[in-house]
Image (cartoon, grey):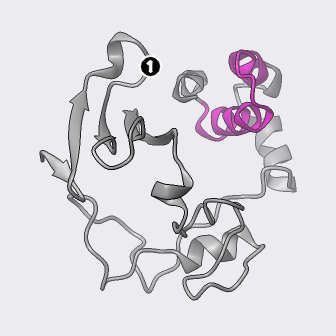
Amino acid sequence: MDSLGGFPVIFKDRSKYSHYKAGLDIDLSPMFPGEKISVAAWKESVRIDVKNGSKASFGKSVGILGKFESGRTLSRKGALMDDFVECGQEWQVLPTEPMLFHETSVPQFPAKCVELEDPQGERRRRRLDESGIKEKEAEAACARLEDPSDRKGCVYDIIVTQDLDIAGAY
């Protein structure tokens, strides 16, 4: 693949300068100078970063991550959605939409997406009590992260996966 949506795609070996093993950049510079979308894979995780995104390039974007300017989550028809689980189900890929991955895996529409547990709920407390990796260890592994929401997500991911190395994905 040389391009995506008419924009050049540059494949990268990211292992030289990060925990990510492989990735690609979609160079938006031909139309939007200084902007790109970076995609990186680490174990079973994928990270997507929009670098220098602007209103010109993403101002009309609406999707599972919300509207570009406000971050408000909307349904496919534009209705405001405050329930993240409901929003995730709403944006599940439909059979009529183009295939993004080489293989399909369950669940596929009309089966619902698997819901994650409430990270502050009773199941989380039970899992923390039973886990080999304790919350303090996860917090230490994620301590270098400056953004509080990244730190919280990092701790949660470590507890769920029981893998301290997942901190490398942040």
Q: How crowded is the residue under tag 1: few (<14 C-alpha within 10 Å), some, or many (20+)?
A: some
Residue shown at the point (53%, 71%) measured from the top left: 113
Q: Is residue 135 above or below residue 29?
A: above
Which of 111/64 is in front? 64
9 inside magenta stretch: no
Q: Residue furthest left?
A: 1
Q: Is residue 29 left or right of residue 142?
A: left
Residue shown at the point (59%, 70%) measured from the top left: 88
Question: On the image, which quarter does residue 131 sit in?
Answer: top right
Question: On the image, which quarter does residue 20 sit in?
Answer: top left
Give SS at disc 1: loop
Quadrant for the C terminus in the image: top right
Magenta span dominant secondary structure: helix
Which of 48/170 is in front? 48
143 inside magenta stretch: yes
Q: Position of residue 122 (x, y in %)?
A: 87, 54
Which of 77/100 is in front? 77
Residue shown at the point (83%, 36%) measured from the top left: 129
Q: Position of residue 135 (x, y in %)?
A: 80, 28
Q: Is residue 134 above or below residue 17?
A: below
Residue shown at the point (80%, 48%) measured from the top left: 124
Q: Residue furthest top?
A: 16
Question: On the image, which quarter does residue 107 sit in?
Answer: bottom left
Q: How many marks?
A: 1
Q: Is residue 71 above or below residue 149?
A: below
Q: Amino acid at mark 1?
A: His
Q: Is residue 98 left or right of residue 161?
A: left
**Start-end of magenta stretch:** 137-162
Q: Which residue is mark 1?
A: 19
Q: Position of residue 34 (x, y in %)?
A: 41, 35
